[in-house]
Amino acid sequence: MSCEEVCAFLDAYTDRELDVMASLQFERHFAECARCRAVCEEYEQLSREVRTCIPRFDAPQGLERKIRAELHLGNRPSPRPKHIAGRNWRSWAFAASFTGLLVSSAIVLSLLRRPVSDVVAQEVVSSHIRSLMANHLSDVASSDQHIVKPWFSGKLDFAPVVKDLSTKGFPLEGGRLDYLDNRPVAALVYKHRQHTINLFLWPSSQSDFTPRTLSMKGYNVVHWTQSRMAYWAVSDLNRAELNEFARELRAAGSS
Amino acid sequence: MRNKATTKEVQEAKDELFEVTVLPYVNSAYNLARWFTRNQHDAEDLVQEAFLRALRSFQTFIPGHDARAWLLAIVRNCCRTWYRKSRFDATTVPFTEDAAITIATWADPEALLIENVDSRVIHQALEDLALEHREILILRELEELSYKEIAEIIQVPLGTVMSRLSRARKEFHRRLGKATTEVTQ
């Protein structure tokens, strides 16, 4: 496979639209061609950023009712659309109208402002920096998840998911309590090479969404929800490896 | 005596099937129309029109197929008709399909960060995109339709879906204020 061919089909590869044979050829090429591998990683990053930042508009209140009326359908509540296997519904629910109010574009734009997660992201980064400064990383220092997890019981109103990922290069170092988003949360400390990763987790009412990456004050932050838990991982580790951490954790979490 | 379903019963069964199969996708329909038309009023009208058309042509829908993709094709057609009829917007970026596949190499790797990009900037960047780019981004990134489904909806070959998507992503990313130097292969 030539570099030209790789570049021509890069989108199909990153979108998982290639068949198995073609994907394997890509991977074989990447094993030998550092330049194409780098271009691919950059492109995957771009693609991820595009995907995670496009906002979605939810239908205004009453539109469904109007449609039902016009089509002479009943007024049963609509079933939620079935989840198609392998696809996640990512939705930032922006209500684009208020019944009876004149909606100026300023109001709409302010509604489009990123949700609370931006504020939380700042808190997460600050907490990470504070933990490093005060050298207060763990209250329970242990790489044994069977020691760390029970330590939280009685201190939190939820049971945090604690996984040791030493076999993947991300050993657990310990845990502590923290306070974010107006609630007590679990903070788990992981290490990767010389970098410290703080993983914050707490219960979330949001439905699952795949990891979102952002950078703040020179730190990288990865955020996702899985099984009704919100996860925030922050580190000075580079994005690729932090995303790898998130991937490993998510894989371990679903087992 | 054979038990024949009355026309009314058949109609009710159809309506119920439509309700269960197609109506759940009001949000997807609205989202596509909203980004297409860039305003709520027209989007609502188009969605209503699309659902009307969908119900009328429901017999062409093959059970077991993806109702969402089927519906979005109808929504998209309605949007296209609206677009042709509406006044030409001089601020719209003219669309050119670029046959050359370009590889972007980043002038500054740090420029990949979407740190603190304002929602307004994102929203504006999307709105400023050529229509063809905006719609393909919505269909792929938000609706997660496959290349094949997208090809059917926008009526272009698979290869065009891929190249157009590539351009759309890069263009959108560029408008978010990132520096790139493009190297044409």
Image: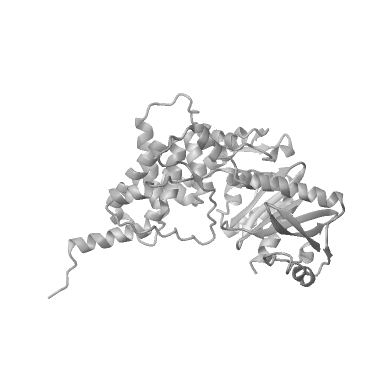
What percent of the width, then of the height, locates residue B121? 59, 34
Given residues B6 and B141, the one toward you in this image is B6
Given residues A146 and B148, the one toward you in this image is A146
Q: Quadrant of the C terminus of chain B?
A: top right
Q: Residue extending furthest left?
A: B1
What percent of the width, then of the height, locates residue B127? 51, 34
Question: In which quadrant of the rendered view does residue A201 lie?
Answer: bottom right
Q: Residue extending furthest bottom?
A: B1
The residue located at (32%, 61%) in the rendering is B17
One can see residue B99 in this view: no
Q: How many marks?
A: 0
Q: Is residue B166 above or below residue A153?
A: above
Q: Quadrant of the N terminus of chain B?
A: bottom left
The residue located at (18%, 61%) in the rendering is B7
One can see residue A109 in this view: yes
Please state if A206 lies on the left or on the right of B12 as rendered.
right
Please state if A124 lies on the left or on the right of B139 as rendered.
right
Q: Is residue A132 above or below residue A102?
A: below
What percent of the width, then of the height, locates residue B82? 36, 35
Q: How is the image coloured?
A: one colour
The residue located at (40%, 26%) in the rendering is B88
Q: Residue extending furthest top?
A: B90
What percent of the width, then of the height, locates residue A171? 80, 63
Given residues A229 and A24, the one toward you in this image is A229
Given residues B35 and B77, the one toward you in this image is B35
Q: Is residue B172 above or below residue A77?
A: above
